[in-house]
Image: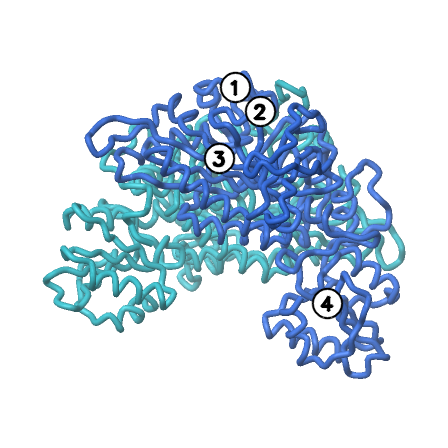
Chain colours: A cyan, B blue
Amino acid sequence: MKQSLLFTKTKKEIPKDEESINARFLIRSGFIDKLMAGVYTFLPLGFRVLKKIENIIREEIKNLGAQEILMPSLHPKQNWQETGRWDTLDSLIKFATFYTKNEYALGPTHEEIVSPLMKNYIFSYKDLPTAVFQIQNKFRDEKRAKSGLLRGREFLMKDLYSFHKNEEELKEYYEKAKSVYAKIFEKIGLGDKTFLTFASGGTFSKYSHEFQTVSSAGEDVIYVCDNPERKRSASHGAGCKIAVNKEIINEQPECPQCGNKNLREEKAIEIGNIFELKTKYSTPFNLNYKDENGLEKEVIMGCYGIGLNRIMGTVVETYHDEKGIIWPKSIAPFSIHLINLKPDADFADRVYNNLQSRGIEVLYDDRKDITAGEKFADSDLIGIPLRAVISDKTEGKIEIKNRNETETKLINIDDIEKFVNNK
Amino acid sequence: MKQSLLFTKTKKEIPKDEESINARFLIRSGFIDKLMAGVYTFLPLGFRVLKKIENIIREEIKNLGAQEILMPSLHPKQNWQETGRWDTLDSLIKFATFYTKNEYALGPTHEEIVSPLMKNYIFSYKDLPTAVFQIQNKFRDEKRAKSGLLRGREFLMKDLYSFHKNEEELKEYYEKAKSVYAKIFEKIGLGDKTFLTFASGGTFSKYSHEFQTVSSAGEDVIYVCDNPERKRSASHGAGCKIAVNKEIINEQPECPQCGNKNLREEKAIEIGNIFELKTKYSTPFNLNYKDENGLEKEVIMGCYGIGLNRIMGTVVETYHDEKGIIWPKSIAPFSIHLINLKPDADFADRVYNNLQSRGIEVLYDDRKDITAGEKFADSDLIGIPLRAVISDKTEGKIEIKNRNETETKLINIDDIEKFVNNK
């Protein structure tokens, strides 16, 4: 895409009402716009990142045999009364419309919708196991929404629900989901800093699990197992989450998996969670099935969430320097930022068209009347992984540099693809 | 996809609380599920159709140079007060949350959001023209939501907003949008029955334009120009919309374009609309730009909507018979419905894998213990354009049939692709 056509522009001013690093950089670089506290518009660059995160999640979740659906945001009061959560869930946005006086909730999660939905399709043991997921908008009545994309009033989630004959079948699926989650976070570039943690307070099992990314912007405290034989990663690391929202509710100095001592990581961001719901929602909605002997049994459920906005915010909190964002290649809005500093555009246009024809996603800074310094500053702020500069000095070649390095190289046009694919 | 794994099943019963053909067929065949009046879940088959409609629209809208964004559903009261529509738009879902007591509207359209947004990025004549679009969820406080996907309380829209220096520039873009819209409806299979109509009551221009599909399920009345030299289609036909909601407000027997007499089409469904907004929203939000002489001028706007749910509903109203839906190829959930009637699955599995490897989207009815009659009935109900049957009678060949024809043909596996691409 030609940058001269991009309607957004970078901003020099730091947004006054934003404290978080992710919101400051994402707003300044034109990825998002703030409509009000906790509610953001995704602009073209941000929309591209969002779609890449979405596609990575979708591809991996499909490996769990889950079928994609799209449930509504507008929920009838009755469904939330069935489970009692109409009255108990503080963050539920619930209201009566001024005109028709209908009472609704705006879905913060979809157990109250998916359980009665599946009642239409699950009858017998032959219909199990099955799983559905969606990538859809969620709403929360947050009292304080001040962490940019980390804690929103409106945000996109991937929510997956699985349905089983018994707890063994759920456990097997749950373990698969764990490893698919680890793979997703690895692909997104958060693998090294993300830990599978045990969260206390799982209502129906001893622990639920959260995927926590260590970050100074985090609001949670986790303990990470210090066993040197365990690789610290989302797939292998055993973090032991003890406290949420800075309030330590239970010191747990030993890893419940291996008994080894834990290291306290002061701050972490929850980017995914998985729960064994068991019969918590099948009971109120009478979601039952007939087993091999014709006996009526309750369906056993699991649920699995990932927050897309929160992922984007966490990536920015994790990968930036004082100049701007440093996107991981897998979710960068473009693979390469081509910058023309020559007075004429002939060579740069040719390079741009060449890259486009090879299917390489390129943002082409073709703007005139902008200084080299401004173009470099914009490029650092936007944070595309690879920068390619064409100037009078490069003499028919291209000066290439990774966003997170200082070393530049002069290369021929035919070598660009190698760099795009390598880093 | 193997049909045995599809969690939805077809239903024999007609949904009691649904009057409309589209909802009856879409629910019975497992494309959608009704959560409450006017609010539906898209199930795997319906989700696939939705994505196909979305992709056709996205591809064509990009030809208008519009950049994709994603605006929120939750709108602050203040934005709607700026334009006065907080008080005047009956169908606006507005509420105070029970918990934080914040007052919000749920967006039924996004002029109140996009206009102040663009104020951050439009400063000079150099920033114009520009255009943004989104494919996003909308909400309306419908008193009566009884027409299935045709009139919902929650529904997906493509909304495009264009920004211009002057009315000539808007007009030029508006004409391009008209032809892009016509192409979209042609691709979706509604071209023959859809007319570009003049709607009275455009606030700032003599006429706004609506794209109306003639259908017995329609709630509007249109007059279609009977000039035999004009092809009756979305791109060429000149319908003259006179009345909405069956209440004729102005008989107009002559076509305003050619003076020829008009034919009354009793019922039509509005599937798209385009408006010259001019300064209606730039005025309240002070959306201005500096022209070549440094003079401050108001930005001239246009807006352009297409309802995705309504398109899906209209297609079903248009293309069905007594047995079920007949999807146009371009938006069918699968290209081919492969049905195995043999006791063993060896040959059918091979055909399925062969088609999959060639990238052909196939729903494979591999279910056992289901009679041939039931499989055919399901196939007719679901409405995939091409049906391929493997049975003991077909002797190593495949019996192929179009959904909308009765004639069958025995063909070799290598000839299937030809049929998929032809029809």
Which element carries disc 2, helix, strand or loop? Answer: loop
Left or right: B164 in relation to A182: left
Q: Chain of mark 3?
A: B
Kind of residue at disc 3 = Pro
Kind of residue at disc 2 = Leu
CB under 8 Å between discs 3 and 2: no
Q: Chain of mark 4?
A: B
Between B294 and A246, the one lying in front of the other is: B294
Give the mark nearer the N terminus: 4 vs 3.
3
How far apart in space, not on screen, are marks 1 and 4 (Cα)? 51 Å
Query: Residue at (27%, 68%) from the top-left corner?
Result: A416
Kind of residue at disc 4 = Tyr
Task: Look at mark 3 in the image and give the residue it sits on.
Answer: B72
CB under 8 Å between discs 1 and 4: no
Query: Residue at (83%, 54%) from the top-left corner?
Result: B323
Which element carries disc 1, helix, strand or loop? Answer: helix
Between A214 and A89, the one lying in front of the other is: A89
How far apart in space, not on screen, are marks 3 and 2 (Cα)? 15 Å
* Place of residue B363 in the rendered image (x, y in percent of width and height, measured from the top left): 70, 64
CB under 8 Å between discs 2 and 1: yes
Which element carries disc 4, helix, strand or loop? Answer: strand
Query: Residue at (67%, 19%) from the top-left corner?
Result: A101
Q: Which mark is residue B364?
A: 4
Give the mark nearer the N terminus: 3 vs 1.
3
How far apart in space, not on screen, are marks 4 and 3 (Cα)? 39 Å
Q: Which mark is residue B92?
A: 2
Residue B166 versus residue A375 in the image, above or below = above
Q: Which mark is residue B86?
A: 1
Q: Quadrant of the image for the N terminus of chain B?
A: bottom right
Discs 1 and 4 share one subunit:
yes
Discs 4 and 2 share one subunit:
yes
